[in-house]
Amino acid sequence: MPEPTTIPLRGETLVGDAAFREAAELYTRVFQYEEPEFSLNPNLLSALAKNGGSAVGVHDEGRLVGFAYGFAGRDRSGAEYHYSQAAVVDPDYQGRGIGRLLKACQREVALGWGQRRMRWTFDPLLSRNAHFNFAALQAEGTGYAVDYYDRPRTDRIIVDWALDRTADPFEGVRTLPTPSFSSADWGRVFRATENGIRTARLPLPVAGASAFRVGDLQASIRDGMQAIFSTGLVLVDCTRLDDETAVYLAAEGQ
């Protein structure tokens, strides 16, 4: 692993064909995509960056070590936002805050286009991603999409991030103490009322599906998440309890 740089890293907008090609290579390598249909077209990145989208990166001594891209979006209700399609970090640089730098840079790009919210999705089994989205960025999980990419086992949680919010309405909820759970509780919903606020918790394995049969776990998570969202709650945190178990926390909208 490279030694930590002495120069503070920062996110920046990518410009030029060479930069977009390097981003496409990093994207393919990190995600280990071998099928050509899953590769990223540098021309697409160039077009997105010029038309309401983002293509941002983090460099260390000239080497691209993180990359994210997105585009202008609108849902069926007419709500407009910046949709962040993907963010990737070189494995040698993971755990060094690159993801936060990418999201901060994407935020500035989105605000520059007049977009006040950002959305993206993530795999509900990835508790580490959930913790970053909710605890670090103070975004919320607002919906559950079944087979998001029109393929089996591509369920995703939809994340909504208010880019110009000055105060976190869920600050008191995100810091609520987490009860103890074990592997016997994975995939089950536990409801409560805390400080006058309706909450729900859903435990899951830290390692995703590696410690549980994928089909069973995904079905339990799917049913639990849909039940949580159907009662008007949103996801506001995901806490790791121990080496085995993490817990989603949902609360009623503020």
Image (tube, helix red, strand yellow):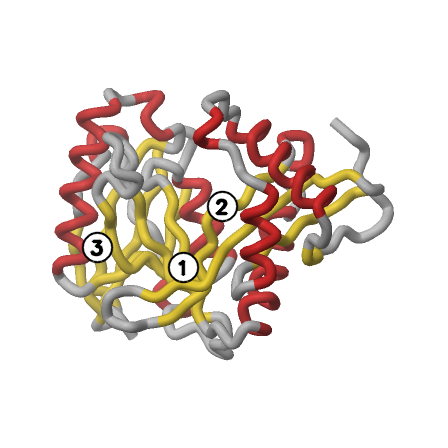
Residue 86 marker? 2
Q: Which residue shows up at 51% across the image and 56% down it?
A: 136
Q: What is the secondary structure assignment of the residue under circle 1?
A: strand
Residue 200 marker? 3
Question: Do callouts 3 and 1 mark residues in contact (Cβ within 8 Å)?
Answer: no
Return the x and y of residue 89 as percentages of the image width and height: 61, 39
Q: Please give left or right for residue 254 compared with residue 47 in the image.
A: left
Answer with the quarter of the image where residue 123 lies.
top left
Answer with the quarter of the image where residue 159 lies.
bottom left
Mark nearer the N terminus (3 vs 1): 1
Instruction: Please state, as top left, top right, bottom left or bottom right, where the N terminus lies in the image.
Output: top right
Instruction: Please state, as top left, top right, bottom left or bottom right, where the C terminus lies in the image.
Output: bottom left
Mark nearer the N terminus (2 vs 1): 2
Return the x and y of residue 65 as percentages of the image width and height: 69, 39
Q: What is the secondary structure assignment of the residue under circle 2?
A: strand
Mark nearer the N terminus (2 vs 3): 2
Cα–Cα gap, marks 2 and 3:
28 Å
Q: Which residue shows up at 32% across the image and 53% down it?
A: 158
Q: Residues within 10 Å of mark 3 (few under 14, many from 20)?
A: many
Cα–Cα gap, marks 2 and 1:
11 Å
User: Which residue is disc 1 drawn over?
Assistant: 119
